[in-house]
Image: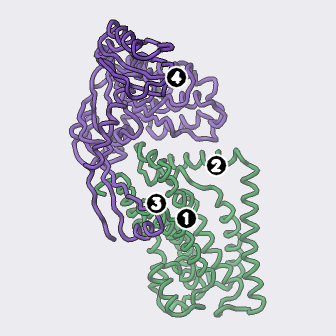
Chain colours: A purple, B green
């Protein structure tokens, strides 16, 4: 279905020198840095699989979606979708995929929602029978009937996103790319959309490629998760696996009477958040060692209060990101520097 | 994209504009009044001079209208998408045009078709027809067909100009000042180019062939004998489709560059 091997995408980023002299210098010579938005990533996705593609801002998630849909041409590596190379057969592939960009709209702002659906029917040449069948389902499941005749500008964000998702699925695509589909929505709207996507995935075997910052989206929809950071793939596996690997860890937030500073001695514990007298630690070896940890600490520093919790998936991801940020501060020097004159 | 789909886009564009009927009406009236004032200025000028380089008021009105009409037709399809392109790229909204099983070029034009040029078309057609009825022209079927083709070719040439400048957005990201230069240049052809020096005439004929839009076709229609070089009359019919094709290729080149093919 989707096959990616050693895929990379590089951008040139021009460095802007500061000050008057720097500005003049920039006119004639500009240094640029090569930024690797996607760096040597490989994976494959089967028909009917739902995967969550996860990473902090700037990790190259959108770039990956753009390469899979043929919007962008990769710098190197192989990619095929439905056995076709996306940027070479972009229009062919466009017939078989649906795309939802959470931050951009495909709907006609001033027109009733149904006009946008009719336009899509014509763009994709959808047979009347299929169109009617899908519309009946969407009107019901996405509850489009309550606003299908209203201009898009009058809809709430949740209604609009339901319409966007219906629109992307109208032509019975094999794969749907969803780039942050629940961004800015309330809990009920999120639930509605998740249920719908899950149902489409289970009943129609539509493959789902989802990026989101909301971990619940991924837990509820996707069986498999890919985590990327700074363009590199750092985790590929099931959501369950990631959780069980780290389920032994506990998160402890301790409120000290006075800030002990950085001098806190950490045995078996990792400092994950430090805001003065409130510090959060992760303990990897189960409940017993967590209790030991608090006892030991309270002997040395007066403790006012503490909260013990299981680490949930969001914390795990957050830790993942944070530990990576530290590694990357040294990586900047590795980037090539070139000077162009023109 | 076929014509039926394109016209459905146009239907949606019109429907959208009609959501703001009042604003649309005011816009149309404003444009008509504005261009009527332009005609008035030329008319007043000719009250003093009677002719400009042998061209009387009706002939100049024809010349001016041919420019305005072809511009309006070309701009209906290309003004909004091309002038807006740099902003669309910067905002990241261009991606959307690469996600449908459609030619990105035609999809882009169709999606941003501008019905507002109906005002220009209205006033320029009225003056054009009036000037034809007033001017001293010996009509033949051949000339009538020539005029029709000249309007089509002129419209394509005007569109091509906007497309070429718009395409530069893919490379420079900001091109608004180039549009200002283009519109300034276009002011030259409000009058017969024979009023200018030889150098400018050569530029307007061969380098930036704006005179092909209205000057040479007008000569051809008014008085064949005035057109010393008959080739120019025929060139005016060919240059429109040709430049549109080249402009289209240039735009596609730019779109490819945007996608990062080898760039």
Q: Is residue A272 above or below residue A289?
A: below
Q: Chain of mark 4?
A: A
Q: How far is disc 4 from disc 2 in space, using C-alphas?
A: 34 Å
From the image, tell me which residue sits under label 4: A190
Circle 1 marks a residue in which chain? Answer: B
Identify the mark nearer the N-term, 1 or 2: 2
- The CA distance from mark 2 to mark 3 is 29 Å
Q: What mark, if any, has residue B14 been given in the picture?
A: 2
Residue under numbered circle 1: B74
Where is residue B13? Give x, y as percent.
60, 48
Residue in the image at 31% along x and 22% along y: A224
Discs 1, 4 touching: Cβ within 8 Å: no
Q: Earlier in the sequence, mark 2 or mark 3?
A: 2
Q: Chain of mark 3?
A: B
Measured as percent of width and height from the top left, residue A310 is found at 40, 12
Q: Which residue is mark 3?
A: B173
Quarter of the image for residue B140 reads bottom right
Seen from the viewer's position, the closer of residues A86 and A172 is: A86
| Number of residues whose C-alpha sits closer than 10 Å to that of mark 1, classed few (under 14), some (14–19) or many (20 or more) | many
Select label 1 or label 3 by which is in front. 3
Label 1 and label 4: CA atoms lie apart by: 45 Å
Mark 2 neighbour density, 10 Å: few (under 14) some (14–19) many (20 or more): some
* SS category of the residue bearing label 2: helix
Q: Answer above or below: position of A209 versus B156.
A: above
- Helix, strand or loop at disc 3? loop
**Quadrant where the C terminus of chain A is found in the figure:** bottom left
């Amino acid at each position: 279905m989707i096959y990616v091997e050693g895929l990379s995408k590089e951008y040139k980023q021009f460095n802007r020198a500061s000050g008057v002299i720097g500005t003049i210098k920039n006119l004639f010579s500009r240094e640029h840095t090569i930024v690797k938005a996607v760096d040597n990533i490989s994976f494959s996705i089967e028909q009917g699989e739902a995967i969550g593609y996860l990473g902090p801002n700037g990790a190259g998630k959108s770039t990956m979606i753009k390469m899979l849909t043929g919007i962008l041409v990769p710098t190197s590596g192989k990619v095929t979708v439905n056995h076709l190379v996306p940027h070479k057969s972009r229009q062919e592939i466009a017939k078989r995929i649906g795309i939802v960009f959470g931050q951009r709209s495909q709907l006609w702002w001033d027109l009733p929602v149904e006009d946008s659906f009719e336009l899509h029917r014509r763009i994709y040449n959808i047979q009347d029978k299929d169109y009617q069948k899908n519309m009946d389902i969407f009107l019901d499941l996405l509850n489009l009937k309550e606003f299908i005749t209203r201009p898009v500008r009058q809809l709430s964000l949740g209604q609009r996103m339901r319409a966007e998702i219906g629109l992307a699925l109208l032509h019975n695509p094999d794969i749907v790319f969803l780039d942050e589909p629940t961004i800015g929505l309330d809990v009920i709207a999120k639930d509605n959309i998740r249920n719908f996507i899950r149902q489409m995935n289970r009943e129609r075997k539509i493959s789902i490629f989802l990026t989101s910052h909301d971990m619940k989206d991924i837990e509820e929809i996707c069986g498999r998760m890919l985590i990327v950071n700074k363009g590199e793939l750092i985790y590929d596996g099931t959501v369950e696996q990631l959780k069980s690997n780290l389920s032994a860890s506990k998160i402890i937030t301790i409120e000290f009477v006075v800030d002990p500073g950085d001098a806190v001695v950490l045995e078996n514990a990792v400092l994950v958040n430090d805001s003065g007298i409130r510090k959060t630690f992760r303990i990897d070896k189960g409940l017993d060692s967590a209790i030991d940890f608090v006892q030991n600490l309270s002997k040395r520093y007066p403790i006012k209060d503490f909260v013990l919790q299981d680490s949930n998936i969001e914390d795990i991801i957050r830790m993942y990101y944070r530990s990576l940020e530290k590694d990357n501060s040294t990586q900047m020097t590795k980037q090539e520097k070139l000077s162009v004159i023109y | 994209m076929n014509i039926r789909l394109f016209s459905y886009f146009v239907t949606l564009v019109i429907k959208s504009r009609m959501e703001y009927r009042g604003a649309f009406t005011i816009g149309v009236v404003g444009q008509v009044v504005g261009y009527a004032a332009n005609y008035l200025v030329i008319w007043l000028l000719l009250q003093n001079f009677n002719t400009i380089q042998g061209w009387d008021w009706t002939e100049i009105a024809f010349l001016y209208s041919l420019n305005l009409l072809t511009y309006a037709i070309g701009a209906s399809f290309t003004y909004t998408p091309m002038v807006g392109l740099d902003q669309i790229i910067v905002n990241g909204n261009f991606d959307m045009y690469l996600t449908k099983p459609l030619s990105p070029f035609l999809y882009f034009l169709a999606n941003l078709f501008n019905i507002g040029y109906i005002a220009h078309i209205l006033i320029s057609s009225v003056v054009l027809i009036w000037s034809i009825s007033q001017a001293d022209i010996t009509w033949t079927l051949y000339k009538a067909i020539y005029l029709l083709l000249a309007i089509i070719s002129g419209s394509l040439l005007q569109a091509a100009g906007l497309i070429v400048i718009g395409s530069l957005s893919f490379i420079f990201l900001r091109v608004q000042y180039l549009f200002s230069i283009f519109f300034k240049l276009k002011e030259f052809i409000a009058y017969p180019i024979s009023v200018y020096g030889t150098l400018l005439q050569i530029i307007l004929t061969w380098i930036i062939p704006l005179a092909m839009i209205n000057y040479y076709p007008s000569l051809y229609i008014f008085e064949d004998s005035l057109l010393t070089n008959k080739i120019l009359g025929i060139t005016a019919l060919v240059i429109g489709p040709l430049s549109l094709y080249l402009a289209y290729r240039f735009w596609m080149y730019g779109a490819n560059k945007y996608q990062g093919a080898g760039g």
